[in-house]
């Protein structure tokens, strides 16, 4: 019985010192799987690569919908009777609910702003201009104009310094898989 702890310790040491085994030898044991690499060019959250005009408008529609969804609950909180100022007993509950909704709104708006920036940068890349052109959105009263123009401009034909032509890659994949 005194030998049992030594056996357990030697078995644990053998696990770490053992040579790599094939997947067939490790059936039923836990494996550490390396995380997948983040492909920024094909991610909707990344700032590298190019996108088409149609993808731009779809993403910007999603940004608009996300912004409305984010802001709507916080606007509706003021319609609740317990959220009104000076209503007495329900005021504390309304304040907590308003705080939770505001936190959810800010979180959602951060994601929609990031998606909007990534989408616009990729679209600027498609017309072979720097993603820093997105700063044109910061011009008061005129910031929406570059966004509309960006959604209407044709992208650069063929590859450019920001990546492969998204239209060419779509037609190639469509020609390979005719269904």
Image (cartoon, helix red, strand yellow):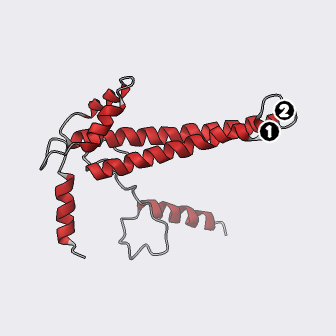
Q: Is residue 15 above or below residue 136?
A: below
Q: Secondary structure at mark 2?
A: loop
Pointer 1 with pointer 2, Cβ within 8 A: yes
- Name the spot of residue 18 as percent of width and height, x first: 40, 64
Q: Is residue 130 above or below residue 35?
A: above
Question: Number of marks in the image?
Answer: 2
Q: Residue 168: give its label.
A: none
Question: Split into 4 quadrants, where in the image is the C terminus?
Answer: bottom left
Residue 70 in sight in this render: yes
Q: Which residue is at the front of the view, 84 or 15?
A: 84
- Name the spot of residue 38 as percent of width and height, x first: 35, 50
Q: Would you say 8 lies left or right of 42 here?
A: right
Residue at horizontal 21%, vertical 67%? 174
Residue 3 in sight in this render: no
Residue at horizontal 37%, vertical 38%? 117
Q: Is residue 7 above or below residue 123?
A: below
Q: In the rendered image, which quarter is residue 171 located in?
A: bottom left
Residue that mark 2 sits on: 87
User: Which residue appears farthest toward the left when viewing the image?
Assistant: 158
Residue that mark 1 sits on: 82
- Alpha-carbon neighbours of circle 2 within 10 Å: few (<14), some, or many (≥20)? few
Q: Would you say 33 lies left or right of 55 here?
A: right
User: Which residue appears farthest toward the top when viewing the image?
Assistant: 140
Residue at horizontal 80%, vertical 38%? 82
Q: Secondary structure at mark 1?
A: helix
Residue at horizontal 51%, vertical 66%? 11
């Amino acid at each position: 019985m005194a030998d049992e702890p030594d056996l357990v310790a030697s078995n644990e040491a053998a696990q770490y010192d053992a040579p790599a085994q094939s997947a067939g030898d490790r059936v039923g044991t836990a494996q550490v799987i390396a995380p997948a690499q983040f492909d920024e060019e094909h991610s909707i959250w990344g700032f590298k690569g190019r996108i088409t005009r149609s993808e731009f408008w779809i993403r910007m529609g999603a940004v608009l919908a996300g912004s409305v969804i984010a802001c709507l609950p916080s606007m509706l909180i003021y319609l609740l009777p317990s959220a009104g100022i000076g209503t007495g007993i329900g005021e504390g509950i309304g304040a907590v609910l308003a705080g939770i909704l505001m936190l959810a709104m800010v979180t959602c708006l951060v994601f929609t702003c990031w998606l909007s920036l990534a989408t616009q940068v990729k679209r600027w890349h498609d017309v072979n201009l720097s993603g820093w052109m997105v700063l044109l959105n910061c011009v008061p009263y005129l910031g929406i104009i570059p966004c509309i123009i960006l959604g209407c401009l044709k992208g650069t034909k063929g590859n450019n310094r920001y990546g492969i032509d998204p239209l060419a890659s779509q037609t190639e994949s469509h020609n390979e898989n005719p269904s």
